Amino acid sequence: MLIEDYGLIGDMQSAALVGRDGAIDWLCLPRFDSPSCFAALLGDERHGTWRIAPHAEVRSGERRYRESTLILENEIETSAGSVRMIDFMPVRIEGPPRLMRIVEGLAGEVPMHMDLMLRPDYASIVPWVEHAPDGAFVVAGPDAFRLSTNVPLQMRNGTISADFKVPAGAREHFTLCWHLSYERTPPVEDADSALARTAAWWQAWSERCAYEGAHRQEVMLSLRVLKALTSQQTGAVVAAPTTSLPEDIGGVRNWDYRYCWLRDSVLALEALLAGGYGEEALAFRDFLMRAGTGDPSKIQIMYGLAGERRLTEFELPDLPGYEGSKPIRIGNAASEQFQLDVYGEVIGAAYLAATEVDGGEPRFWPRWRAAIEYFETIWREPDDGIWETRGPRRHFTYSKVMGWVVFDRAIKLAERFSLEGPLERWKQAREEIHAEVCERGYDPQRRTFTQYYGSQELDASVLNIPLVGFLPCDDARVSGTIDAIMAELGRDGFVSRYSTAKSDDGLPGDEGQFLACSFWLVSALAANGRAQEAEVLFDRLVGLSNDLGLLAEEYDVARQRQVGNFPQAFSHLALISAARTLSKAAASTSAVAA
């Protein structure tokens, strides 16, 4: 099944992927980064799945999210009639995670078949399965599951199956609850009651949206995806709910994205604030405060959901991988890399939070100042770059630009809120970095900023140079960089992060076109006064989303399909940012015309 054939449901502590065929092929419980209990996404049904589908010829199907929610509905017409599948994860209050499925008869009488194959700990074990008064009980080590349903069940070799019919007007309910095996089984919540509660919660959340700019429908869906990928407990935003979906089908560029990248922090804060979600913005700010402060020399590029630092990477040899793409990686060794740009993200997020959320509370300043003063001692060093390449360290242009952001935002924070700091020294550092980037990171013959000092290679990250305020949006060097990236990194109009064929990134193979970078191009074009080009590209990018509006990390132009982990927060964050930039460009044009 194609990556884009899946839909997302979640409860803001975990998430599941539901296929068009009625199979839930990926789910980790109780957290996003817990071991999976369904992993058919990275193999086949033997590795864990829960499929409920008509046992009759399927003639058509249409799925959608119930209005203003992440409740997935799939209306299926068969030779025997039609049914509606309703899949959702109820918003948790204090109870355990639950996954609920309702089959609603619409016409005729449709025969249905169910197979539930729970395979905990990344499909490493077949659990013990036994009958329970209202369904089945499943246990393996620390993991226990309770399936509640009125449908008669059969059990064999660790698989729970059922055959049943759903006439028009009837509803069959299935509730799967996870809990620790050494704790008492929690009470079962009525599925219809949970559905009404969850729908009301999502609709009330969506109604709070304050964004009224261009492409509101796409922005609203992206905000719901962002909310679904935000830990209700800690405020962290996971990059994606999946691991090891390949950037190159059949290749080795497969990474675990179930963590929070500091790289995404400013975009996440901007998106939440643009939507009017101040509570979520504060929660994320507080997560950054906990994770990104302390010893400034220990700031990492990513953290676990609660700020965990040890994200040791290892491989699972027994999972065959999505379409044979191996290895399957758990954890992420990039957490141990040295990336200068994260200091720019941390201080940029601090500045945004101070100006838009907390009013520059003085009690936070000592933490940020410690990071700034430490950065003064390291910014001249080469680093691993924003993309976690596994090649040699370089003086990456974008890393130095984000170093300029550190001092620029530090100065503005101190001046705006009367905070103490060595402003003259920081101003000198800001000027030194600016001059160095313009001299060593810019190729005057080709009229473009390059990937790293002295390089002939390009990198889409430098599209952010005007967006962070390093240069004016209409600067000739900005215009030249946009044109060069479109010409050299563009594939059918979409943008690669960098040239994997030319860059020494330490990995074999290629990758798809990076959707966040393509949305950066939209923002850069719009800010550069090329709004019409930007609008055309934005519409093409939105057209790559699946029928539910979801985007993966990348798009493979050659194969014409989505690739990479799915759905990807970075893609949806960049979509929101691009829509906001288009709105500002349109407003500016209208003001000039008036």
Image (cartoon, grey):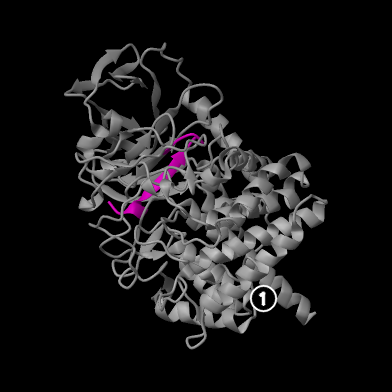
Q: Residue furthest bottom?
A: 445
Label 1 crowd bin: few (<14), some (14–19), many (20+), radius 10 Å: some
Q: Nearer the viewer, residue 510 or 14?
A: 510
Would residue 130 be found to the left or right of residue 234 on screen? Answer: left
Residue at 50% across, 31% down: 90
Secondary structure under tag 1 reads: loop
Residue 449, image x, y percentages = 51, 77
Q: Residue furthest right?
A: 418
Would residue 162 be found to the left or right of residue 288 on screen? Answer: left
Compared with residue 280, is residue 532 higher up or lower down, i.e. above or below? below
* Kind of residue indicated by mark 1: Pro
Q: Magenta segment: does it hold 411?
A: no
Residue at 20% across, 41% down: 317
Q: Magenta segment: does it hold 12?
A: yes
From the image, tell me which residue sits under label 1: 472
Residue 544, image x, y percentages = 42, 63
Would residue 260 be seen by someone viewing this image from the given angle?
no
Would residue 11 be found to the left or right of residue 62 on screen? Answer: right
Would residue 12 be found to the left or right of residue 42 on screen? Answer: right
Please state the extent of the stretch shown in magenta in the rendering.
1-15
Residue 134, image x, y percentages = 35, 15
Residue 186, image x, y percentages = 45, 15
Using the rendered view, name the quadrant where residue 594 is placed.
bottom right
Residue at 62% across, 48% down: 371
Q: Residue furthest left?
A: 157
Compared with residue 544, is residue 77 higher up or lower down, i.e. above or below? above
Q: Nearer the viewer, residue 521 or 83?
A: 521
